[in-house]
Image (tube, rainbow, N blue to C red):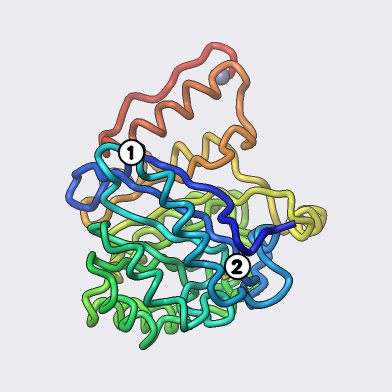
Amino acid sequence: MVDPWKAHGTVFEEERAPNGAVERVGTVFLAGAECPFTCSFCDLWRWTLEGPTPPGALPIQLGRALEAFRGEDPLPERLKLYNASNFFDRRAVPAEDVPRIAELAQPFRAVTVESHASMVGPEAVEFAALVSGTLEVAIGLETIHPGAMSHLNKRLDLARFDRAAAFLAEQHIDLRVFVLLGAPYVPPAESLEWTVRTVEYAASRGAGRIAVIPVRGGNGELERLQGLDAFAPPTLAQLEQALDHCLPMRTAAVTVDLWDVARLPSCDACRSGRIARLARMNVTGRTEPPISCTACA
Ligand code: SF4
Ligand SMILES: [Zn+2]
């Protein structure tokens, strides 16, 4: 059961900025209404409420979650508010709560929220005006593979993404982009190539931060697609190759998402060493020599 008055949790981490500096980031995972989109690879609905977010719930969740920040010295520079949906969907974030959320975010130099590209509009500009720091909007581009894009159930095309990216740039709002590794309907042999191409595309549209997210099974739909040979779980080796390819990119800070990464298929003998290498490269931005392992060489 998801409690509308209690955030799911808080995570503190270090993150590389586009200029190479390392930022302290605090992420609050808010509980709210389910996203109206039903992307085939997504399981965020597990963390959402049955109906709309009750007015007043998010400021209470955030206020309580920020108590966990008190022990952080120095205070994180960036606050990420992730609500497993779209921050500008008023069913997920009631309009009357937005000013109070912005007020609670005042101590931070930057604030990141997530949104589907089609929900980026005047609400983003209004929120940017309310927060004292820089606003960044995180958008899932996922893949630019034309066949896969139309099959993901995301109702997103490149023209819509481009319009959202251009709108944010005009409004001086930063853009973060999520890119999938192992998107359903991308042929497994082309998986890495399409991830790199999608990262390059996002950077060309002004994304300053790009996170590569390996698709993880477990939501039922991916298992169904796997049975139809339309999905193959990405491997840890592919994730390493994705970062090795994209790290030298200088226009955007590219990282790989390490949440639950130990679940990716890999060699047991060297898995932890490979994950530790990725974690270091995410933060430093410097390529390290590949891990050698006699068990899987
Ligand atoms: S738009 Fe985002 S939150 Fe909504 S279903 Fe798709 S991936 Fe999940
Ligand atoms: Zn190994």
Q: Quadrant of residue 32?
A: bottom right
State left or right for residue 235 relative to residue 87: right
Structural crowding at the residue carrying mark 2, measured as other residues with C-alpha within 10 Å and reported as few (<14), some (14–19) or many (≥20): many
The residue furthest bottom is 122
Q: Position of residue 277 (x, y in %)?
A: 40, 27
Tell me the residue at 45%/78% (across/down). 158
Q: Position of residue 22 (x, y in %)?
A: 24, 42
Q: Is residue 251 visible?
A: yes
Q: Position of residue 43 (x, y in %)?
A: 67, 58
- Please identify the quadrant where the N terminus is shown: bottom right
Q: Position of residue 287 (x, y in %)?
A: 29, 33
Task: Say whether disc 1 or disc 2 marks the residue closer to the N-terminus.
Answer: 2
Tell me the residue at 33%/24% (across/down). 289
Q: Quadrant of ligand 2?
A: top right
Q: How many marks?
A: 2
Q: Nearer the viewer, residue 131 or 193?
A: 131
Secondary element at tag 2:
loop
From the image, tell me which residue sits under label 1.
72
Q: Quadrant of residue 3?
A: bottom right
Rendered position, 276 above or below 192: above
From the image, tell me which residue sits under label 2.
32
Q: CA distance from mark 1 to mark 2?
A: 26 Å
Q: Is residue 193 visible?
A: no
Q: Quadrant of residue 139?
A: bottom left
